[in-house]
Image (spheres, rainbow, N blue to C red):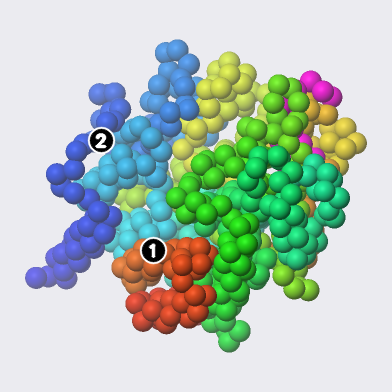
Amino acid sequence: MGGSDVQKFRKMGLVLTLVLSLGVSACSSKPAETEQPAEKTAEQPAGSTDGVLEISTVRAQDPYLKFDEGENFDKNAVYDAYEKDTGVKIINKWVVDGNVNGPQFQEKLKMAIATDDLPDFFPATPTQVQQLIEADMIQDLTEVYEKHATDETKEFMMRDGGLQMKSGTFDGKLMAIPETGNPIVPQFVWVRSDWMKKLNLPEPKTMQDLMKIMETFAAKDPGGTGKAYGLAINKKFNDGALGLVGFMNGYHAYLNQWMDDGNGGLMFSDIQPEMKEALRALQDMFKKGLIDPEFAVKDMMKASELVFNGQIGVLYGAEWTPAHLAQAAVKDGKVVQEWSVYRLPSVDGTEASTQIELGTEKYNVVSKKAKHPEAMIKLLNQWIAIDNHPTEEQKVYGFGKGLKEKGNNYWQLSPVMAFNQASDNGSVLPKAIETKDESLLKTKDQKTRYSRAMKYVNGEDISMWWEMLISGPNGAVSHVPYLKEHKLFHQNKFYGAPTPTMVEKKELLERKRDEIFMKIIMNQVSIDEFDKYVADWKKLGGDDMTKEVNEWYANNK
């Protein structure tokens, strides 16, 4: 077998490995899809005609995307605008229903990889990026990005300090462009302030203060329901609201993170002594009746019923939590549940850090066969420009040819997106709302949020209470500048593709963790079972994972 044959054989093996590892079944049912019109066949080469660069991609049609009459995914005002403004003609190789993480899109993409029938560019997960590199199916974008990305794009993509761009870089080569996002997604504690006032309780500054509040709420039943609890939680520990991550962070314990081990390496957060103390506290709360004994079988919506019914007045959740609470907090044009938001209280004298992740899990990659990789960069440049300082004419990218909001979600038609990694909502919105100074507003998001909050302030729409509790002077985002200033974020230090042991064992280890944590919280086993769990975790693959993660870390510090 000659050298080129060996290369081909190796590549075929890698592609097969990629397909099998992604779970493709040759006899899987073909997903529903919208094929492109006949004149845009898959065989048509992507190229340049009349100065226009043609580039093919694959899409998922979200159910919230609605088309204007006479338009569809292949022919629409957004694609036309990109062609006019950037000289890039977008061709859909195929379109399926759902979203890019959904089963239909993923099955179709896996088959495209298996048959080496890739579009010019497409979205990929971190695992897929790693495997596509190994199969030599995607391009190194380093020079293309350097040459064709605008100065604005280069600045915008580095606002997190460069970590997200680094996550798309392998052996010094930019292989994948991240769909950037804001990693600053803190947890807060939300407390019924009307109940605190009624029971003459001070605001929580420490975990001990919060425990006192929870104990008093459970004992005094300020909602008059006959059965009250202290803390609302549900069966999924890491849920954005009514989860346990914020509580654990108050004990300097972190869920599912790789963190500094103090010796220049990384260790896994779930097995640290601080996690044992957080679980001990939860077990004590369960024994005291501060936690709903049926929480282990309830999802977030089911667990929320106790909050909506006035049986619980404390929960942990992200900044969007008031939009969830509003379902019961605002009734018949009146606010019937008053809530306040606080930074995470700590169990000791050291302030609590809220855990955060990388901020992106989606990347755009370019096929080795694509003739014009720069076309994808041009689309990225345009998205960043129109999303951050749109002209009146550019409203077409958000709203279609009518240039007015009508709930069509035309922004979803843009095939390449990047979002601000460094939102300054926390320093801008509370001040703008308090002073009614619209001149402070810079971004589209700030203008939208300000407009909603002012409807509440001016008494026009009381249901906008939730936006006030997110963006107002004492809202969730008002705490973010303090968190940034005092560096109270605990970021996962591992952002690589899953290691071999993770692929094989992580799911099993997480199931084991959830099972033992749940039993400890519900006082079905002794807190000392945590030590046995740690020993088992190490033996069942944890030590191997730690070794692999540290090998990665040594090359990516």
State the image coordinates of residue 126 (x, y, percent, origin top left).
Answer: 42, 58
Magenta region includes residue 114: no
Mark 1, residue position = 511
In the displayed structure, 353 sits above or below 292; it is below
* Numbered disc 2: secondary structure: loop
State the image coordinates of residue 548 (x, y, percent, origin top left).
Answer: 41, 77
Viewer-side residue, 30 vs 170: 30
Q: Amino acid at mark 1?
A: Arg
Over which residues does the magenta segment extend? 458-472
Left/right placement of residue 143 relative to residue 393 reads left
Magenta region includes residue 471: yes
Mark 2 vs mark 1, CA separation in Å: 30 Å
* Quadrant housing residue 443: top right
State the image coordinates of residue 387 (x, y, percent, origin top left).
Answer: 63, 37
Picture residue at 62% right of the left edge, 19% below the top = 404
Mark 2, residue position = 31
The single residue placed furthest to the top in the displayed view is 69
Sequence-first disc among 2 and 1:
2
* Numbered disc 1: secondary structure: helix
Q: Amino acid at mark 2?
A: Pro
| Residue 300 visible in the shown view | yes
Picture residue at 83% right of the left edge, 29% below the top = 457
Nearer mark to the viewer, of 2 and 1? 1
Disc 2 + disc 1, Cβ < 8 Å? no
Viewer-side residue, 169 vs 406: 406
Report the magenta stretch's main SS: helix
In the displayed structure, 242 sits above or below 332; it is below
Q: Which mark is residue 94?
A: none
The image quadrant where one finds the C terminus is: bottom right
Picture residue at 68% right of the left edge, 66% below the top = 250
State the image coordinates of residue 53 (x, y, percent, origin top left).
Answer: 42, 36
